[in-house]
Image: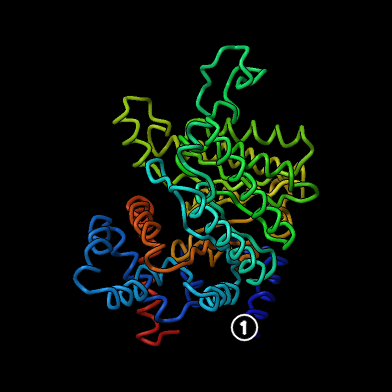
Amino acid sequence: MGQERGAAVAVGRAAAKGTPLNFGDGAAFRLKSGRELARALLVLRLCAFPRLVRHILATSRKILGSRLWGGLLRATFYGQFVGGETPAEVAAAAGRLRAVGLRPMLAVPTEEDVGQEKDGEQWYDANRGAARDCVGLAAAAGPHPMMQLKVTALMSARLCVSATRPCHAPPSSPCRNRRNGDAAFRCLTPEENRHLGVSLRRLDDVAGHAATRGVRVLVDAEQSYVNPALSLATLALMARHNRGSPWVWNTYQAYLQDGKRRLAADAASARRRGVCFGVKLVRGAYLELERRRAREGGIPEPVHPDLDATHRSYGECLELALGLAARDGEGVGVMVATHNEASVLHATQRMEELGIPRQGGGVCFGQLLGMCDHVSLALGEAGYAVYKSVPYGGAEATLPYLARRAQENQGVLQAARRERRLLARELRRRLLRRP
């Protein structure tokens, strides 16, 4: 408890002094234990070889058996990227983050893709219960709590696709949107309509419970073909719950060619309706899947053609989001969710220019647990509000999440050689007992 209070005091002093950011000296890693440093260096080096990691995750259980396999995961990938399984383990992980000036953002990493639909409502109802439990854990994890939510854990992914597919009924049909003829949760079978109603009630129940407990819900974006439905559902939740404060936030993926347009349109819609607006801005996590689907389906790729275009898109979306925060104050929340150092530095510079304070101004930063810690810790030491996404659950439940981290790391971690060098340098310093 004293350690956490000391971290909070240090952050407050840093914010008051306007401490500049420095990602390159590695001093922030002095806040981590030797065991944490060694594990991070091992796992991040392995993740630079995603095929090897996928092979380890897929085959090691057959070779080692369940017990040894679980121990291996906990000592490596699971321990690096997952907060734990039990409430006590999650609370301990949250405490370790608070002790170094960071905030936990809890997440149940359960989602569904087209072709994985479950029979009946039992699986989705169980996930609703897990999401409500997540609200409770987040509320107990410290001040300014946040959590992440995946819509396809509570609603069929196939429904998300069919619900926003253009309606081919006659113009006079009631399934038509009167303004432009597009589908708007209307062109559905009776069974789909029933599932939609139940799913929306599940989402509303979780969002309402979170708002009552003072927990902000950041709805994750998923694949491009389900995102239109996710956005419609999220905007509906905003309209119900974002009165006076942004309790429900939507996620915008800058690697999608229509990312900025969707962000601008949704922000305008929220403003017209007089509701608060929350934005989590990411680059995107389904790049290979999006490109493979476009290639196999003979359709245009929804993502930008190259990394430079994605960087430009992120910068444009960031400028738009920060402008909203500067204009509307507490009516807008923005999370700059990125591991890119240039984007982080640009965001902090624009916050200074727009007069957005480091804490309390509606803008925060986010990175994944176990990744980009040199950026997270430096931001925290400089007085910014920083969240680490903390997935939790058993090894079996989190295995798809871990596999995706390995896939994402092919781009992220190979570019983040600086973090591995800083980890190695800090370990050498401790082994040699240098000051």
Instruction: From this view, report whether residue 132 is shown above or below residue 41.
Output: above
* Residue that label 1 marks: 3
> Residue 297: horizontal and vertical position, in percent?
32, 28
Residue 122 placement (x, y as % from top left): 50, 54
Rendered image quadrant of residue 424: bottom left
Relative placement, left or right, of 415 versus 345 is: left
Front position in the image: 292 or 208: 208
Circle 1 — which element? Answer: helix
Q: Which colour scheme is used?
A: rainbow
| Residue 400 seen by the camera | yes
In which quadrant will I find the N terminus? Answer: bottom right
Disc 1 marks a residue whose amino acid type is Gln
Most distant residue in the bottom direction = 433
Residue 41 falls in which quadrant of the image?
Answer: bottom left
Q: How crowded is mark 1: few (under 14 residues within 10 Å), some or many (20 or more)?
A: some
Residue 405 located left or right of residue 198: left
Q: In this view, does 423 lie to the left or right of 95?
A: left
Q: Which residue is drawn at 30% across and 64% down?
A: 45
**Residue at position x 67%, y 49% in the image:** 204
Above or below 43: residue 33: below
Q: Where is residue 42 in the image (x, y as percent from the top left)?
A: 31, 70
User: Quadrant where the C terminus lies?
Assistant: bottom left
Q: Residue at x 40, y 72 (%)?
A: 79
Instruction: Report the front residue among 326 and 426.
Output: 326
Tell me how many marks there are: 1
Q: 17 or 379, which lies in front? A: 379
Task: Give the residue drawn at x 47%, y 58%.
Answer: 109
Q: In the rendered view, tell whether residue 316 sits above or below residue 395.
A: above
